[in-house]
Image (cartoon, rainbow, N blue to C red):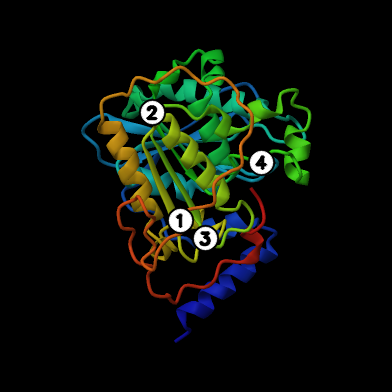
Amino acid sequence: MIPLRRIFVTGLAALAAAACTPLQVFEAVNPPEQGVVRVASASYGAGLRQGLDVYAPAKSTRPLPVVVFFYGGSWDSGDRAEYAFAGEAIASKGFLVAVPDYRLYPEVRFPAFLDDGAAAIRWVRDNAARLGGDPARILLAGHSAGAYNAAMLALDGRYLRRAGVDPAVIRGVAGLSGPYDFLPLDDPTTIKVFGDAPDKPATQPVRFARAGMPAFLATGDTDTTVEPRHTAALSARLREAGSLVTERVYRGLDHADTLLALSVLLRRKAPVLKDMTEFLAQQAAARPVVAAAEPKLRRPRPAPPPAQPDATGTLPEGPPASARPAPSAEPPVGEEFRGTF
């Protein structure tokens, strides 16, 4: 009998030979999420990259809270089809989930992809009810560059207002391994995407920290692509402003792991999906918080050092995190996933 691991590796090699992207390979081998269906695939704008897919539990008898999930890719790559596993995973926990594409560099630079995100949220608000969702309970989430998009759209209301959406409709935000505080621009990716912005502080999520925006912010302690200091900086600013924050630093996880841990295949690596969706469900069920006025831009301050988990992975002010699971027989994630926002 041929070992399952050999079949898995052989399948990966065949897909790689077919010129699939790393995430397409991952989607092909990741087991499907049970009890979840794609309920819509639509355009929210006229552009080729202005489309989205919507996922929902196969059986639901009540309007569901809505999550708009933005994927990463350094603002210059990505396709929503490659992130179906993330949309399905979140939907399996009782949400209607939209995963939008958005325009990328070099077609656009900051802030066009945020305007696309706001337009996608407007489409979700207008169509959620017919798809089984509650348009009054929208939450934003994302990974890496997508976490940046989610945070900016949640905290700086100008983009939603420009799209005709009341920012108060956003009940909370979740960011996985996001870059939130990267001035001065000293990386080729951020220089090309944000370098033309006339007001550089207005590109930074930490500048818009305010009361009334509950946030789940998580990272891995071995992330060298977007260092944990970004999560620590935004968490500190939001707490200072009066927002509820749940901060997690997952031991042994790197930049890609916080995303891939949402999948069926790698979910045992860390309780990212459980922690994030429980937080989002709590915010969806809570009474809306009256947001304070959005802050004026202020001079940058040094970011605080990232929170350090103790031996159990628990941050000083958070509830206990699950202990790191024992190593499994799952094949390691390839290096192709590393090194992008």
Disc 4 + disc 3, Cβ < 8 Å: no
Front disc: 4 or 2: 4
Q: Which residue bears the numbered disc 3?
A: 221
Gap between marks 2 and 1 measured at Cα: 25 Å
State the image coordinates of residue 273 (x, y, percent, origin top left): 38, 52
Secondary element at tag 2: strand
- Residue 143 shows in this picture: no
Gap between marks 2 and 3 measured at Cα: 29 Å
Disc 2 + disc 3, Cβ < 8 Å: no
- Residue drawn 66% across and 32% down? 103
Q: Which residue bears the numbered disc 2?
A: 138
Q: Which residue bears the numbered disc 4?
A: 182
State the image coordinates of residue 74 (x, y, percent, origin top left): 67, 44
Count residues near mark 4 (Cα–Cα under 10 Å), then give few for <14, some for 14-19, many for 20+.
some
Secondary element at tag 4: loop
Comparing 201 with 73, the one in front is: 201
